Image (cartoon, grey):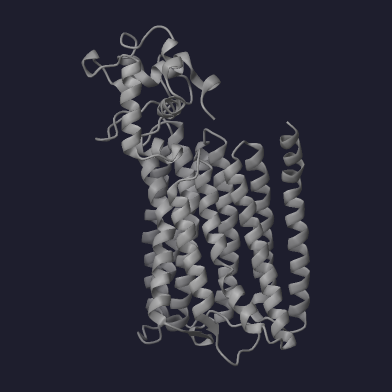
C-alpha cells in the first residue's frame, strides 16, 4: 500500500516535469536560434513539435499507469524522456558548435542518432497496452534498433566544414563502411514492421471487443514505420524534387513529435477496454490516410522531377489524378477496415453486451450466435472454474472477449501452439468433447461469461 501511494504522486508529476524540461530546452534552443546558430535544429516549429510530443506522451504515460497498464505507462514515460533527451542533445550540439568545442563531433554524432529511440518506444507503448507481459518481439525490436542507433552514431559523421548543424542533404554527411551502414538501415526498417504485422494479424483474426483494442494498438505501432517512410521520402524529394533540405528536416521533426503523440493516444484508447467506433475509425483512418499521403507525395515528387520536364500543367493534372484515386481508395478502405474491427451488436438472447465469441480461426468465418447451441452442452454449475489454472483462466477470459488464437497469443505473450494446448485442456476440464456437438469455443466462452466473467477475469 505504501509503495502504491508513493508511486501515484510521481506519476501525477510526470507531465509537469516534462513540461518544465521541454520549456527549458525550448528557451535554450530559442536563444541559440536568435543568435544565429543551429539552422533547422533550432527552428521554432520543430522544437515546439518535439516539446509538445514530450508533454503529450508524458500525460499519456500518467493516465496509462492510472488505468492499470503499468508497462505501457513506463514505455510512454520513456518516450517522453527520449524526446526531451533529443531536445537536450540538440542544444548541446548547437552550443558546442557555436563555441568551437573540440567535442562538437561527438555531440553531433549523439544528436544524429537521438531520433531512433523514440521510434522504438512509440511501438512498445502501443503494443504494451494490449499485452499482459513483455513478448520476445519487444526485446528483439529494441535490440535491433539499438544496433541501428549505434551504427548510425559510429559510422556517420557531419561533413566538414558545415554551417550550423547539417541537414538531411546527403552531401552534409560522411559515412564509413557504407555496406555495414546500409545493412543496419535495412535491419531497422524490417524491425519496425514486426509489431505492426503481429498486431494487425491478431486484430483481423479476432472478434468482439478485443478486435478493436488490437486494431487501435496496431495503428499506434504503425506510426513509427510511417515516420521513417516520411524521412525517406524527404531524402528522395530533395534529389529529384528540389525540396529545401532545412524545410524537409523541420518537417521530419514535426512528424516525429506528432507520431509520438499518436502512439501514446492509441495506447491509452486500447488500454481502456472496449473501443468506441469513432475512436477506432480515427486511429485506422489516420494511419491509412497518412500512408496514402506519402504515396501521393512520393509519386508527385518523381513526376515533378526536373529531368522529366513535363511542365507545370501536366504535373498538376497527374498529381490531382493520383490524389483523387489514392485518397478515395484510402478513405473507403480505412472506413471498411474500421467497420470490420467494430464488434457487431449482440442479439437479445446472445452473450452480454460488449462481448462477442469467435469461431475457430483456422478457417475464418462469420461469428456464430453462441445461444444457438451452447445451452445443452455447457455444465450448469460453475465448479469447473476452480479447476482451471491461472493461465487457462487467462486464455478462456481472452477467448470470451472475442480473441482469436493469434489475438490470445498476442495479449498473453505466448505462442499459438501453446494457446492450442491450453484450449484443449480447458475443453477437457469443461467436459466439452468433439462429439458433444456444437462449437466448443463458443460453449467454453459462454461458460466463462455465465460463471466467471469480468468479476474474476485475470488482470
Q: Residue furthest bottom?
A: 161
Q: Is residue 98 left or right of residue 423?
A: right
Image quadrant containing the N terminus? top right
Counting every numbered tag in the picture gives: 0
Residue 75 location (% of width, % of height): 59, 50
Is residue 387 among the parts visible in the rendering? yes
Residue 65 location (% of width, % of height): 64, 41
Residue 389 location (% of width, % of height): 44, 23
Q: Residue at x 47, y 67 (%)?
A: 147
Q: Residue furthest left?
A: 435
Q: Is residue 20 above or below residue 234?
A: above
Q: Residue at x 70, y 75 (%)?
A: 92
Q: Residue at x 67, y 73 (%)?
A: 90
Q: Is residue 125 above or below residue 454?
A: below
Is residue 315 among the parts visible in the rendering? no
Q: Is residue 118 above or below residue 344?
A: below
Image quadrant containing the C terminus? top right
Q: Nearer the viewer, residue 295 or 226?
A: 226
Residue 296 location (% of width, % of height): 41, 66
Quadrant in the picture for residue 400: top left
Q: Nearer the viewer, residue 190 or 169?
A: 190
Q: Nearer the viewer, residue 283 or 67?
A: 67
Amino acid at each position: 500500500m505504501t509503495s502504491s501511494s508513493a508511486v501515484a504522486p510521481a506519476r501525477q508529476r510526470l507531465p509537469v516535469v516534462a513540461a518544465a524540461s521541454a520549456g527549458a530546452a525550448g528557451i535554450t534552443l530559442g536563444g541559440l536560434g536568435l543568435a544565429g546558430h543551429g539552422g533547422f535544429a533550432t527552428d521554432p516549429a520543430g522544437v515546439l513539435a518535439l516539446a509538445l510530443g514530450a508533454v503529450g506522451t508524458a500525460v499519456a504515460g500518467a493516465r496509462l499507469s492510472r488505468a492499470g497498464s503499468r508497462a505501457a505507462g513506463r514505455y510512454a514515460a520513456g518516450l517522453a524522456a527520449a524526446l526531451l533527451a533529443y531536445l537536450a542533445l540538440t542544444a548541446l550540439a548547437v552550443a558546442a558548435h557555436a563555441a568551437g568545442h573540440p567535442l562538437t563531433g561527438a555531440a553531433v554524432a549523439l544528436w544524429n542518432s537521438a531520433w531512433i529511440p523514440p521510434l522504438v518506444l512509440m511501438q512498445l507503448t502501443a503494443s504494451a497496452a494490449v499485452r499482459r507481459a513483455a513478448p520476445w518481439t519487444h526485446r528483439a525490436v529494441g535490440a535491433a534498433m539499438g544496433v541501428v542507433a549505434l551504427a548510425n552514431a559510429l559510422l556517420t559523421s557531419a561533413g566538414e566544414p558545415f554551417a550550423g548543424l547539417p541537414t538531411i542533404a546527403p552531401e552534409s554527411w560522411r559515412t564509413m563502411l557504407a555496406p555495414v551502414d546500409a545493412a543496419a538501415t535495412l535491419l531497422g526498417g524490417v524491425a519496425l514492421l514486426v509489431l505492426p504485422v503481429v498486431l494487425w494479424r491478431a486484430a483481423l483474426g479476432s472478434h468482439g471487443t478485443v478486435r478493436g483494442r488490437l486494431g487501435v494498438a496496431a495503428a499506434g505501432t504503425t506510426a513509427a514505420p510511417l515516420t521513417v517512410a516520411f524521412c525517406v521520402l524527404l531524402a528522395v524529394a530533395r534529389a529529384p524534387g528540389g525540396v529545401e533540405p532545412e524545410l524537409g528536416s523541420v518537417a521530419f521533426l514535426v512528424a516525429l513529435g506528432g507520431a509520438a503523440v499518436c502512439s501514446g493516444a492509441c495506447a491509452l484508447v486500447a488500454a481502456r477496454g472496449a473501443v468506441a467506433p469513432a475512436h477506432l475509425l480515427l486511429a485506422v483512418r489516420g494511419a491509412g490516410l497518412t500512408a496514402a499521403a506519402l504515396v501521393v507525395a512520393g509519386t508527385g515528387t518523381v513526376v515533378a522531377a526536373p529531368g522529366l520536364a513535363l511542365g507545370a500543367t501536366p504535373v498538376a493534372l497527374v498529381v490531382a489524378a493520383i490524389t483523387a484515386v489514392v485518397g478515395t481508395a484510402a478513405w473507403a478502405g480505412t472506413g471498411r477496415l474500421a467497420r470490420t474491427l467494430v464488434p457487431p451488436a449482440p442479439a437479445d438472447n446472445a452473450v452480454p453486451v460488449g462481448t462477442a465469441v469467435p469461431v475457430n480461426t483456422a478457417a475464418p468465418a462469420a461469428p456464430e450466435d453462441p445461444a444457438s447451441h451452447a445451452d445443452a452442452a455447457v455444465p450448469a454449475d460453475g465448479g469447473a472454474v476452480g479447476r482451471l489454472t491461472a493461465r487457462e483462466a487467462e486464455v478462456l477470459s481472452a477467448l470470451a472477449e472475442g480473441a482469436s488464437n493469434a489475438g490470445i497469443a498476442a495479449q498473453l505473450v505466448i505462442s499459438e501452439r501453446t494457446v492450442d494446448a491450453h484450449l484443449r485442456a480447458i475443453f477437457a476440464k469443461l467436459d466439452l468433447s468433439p462429439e458433444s456437438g456444437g462449437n466448443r469455443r463458443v460453449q467454453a466462452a459462454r461458460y466463462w461469461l455465465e460463471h466467471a466473467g469480468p468479476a474474476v477475469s485475470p488482470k
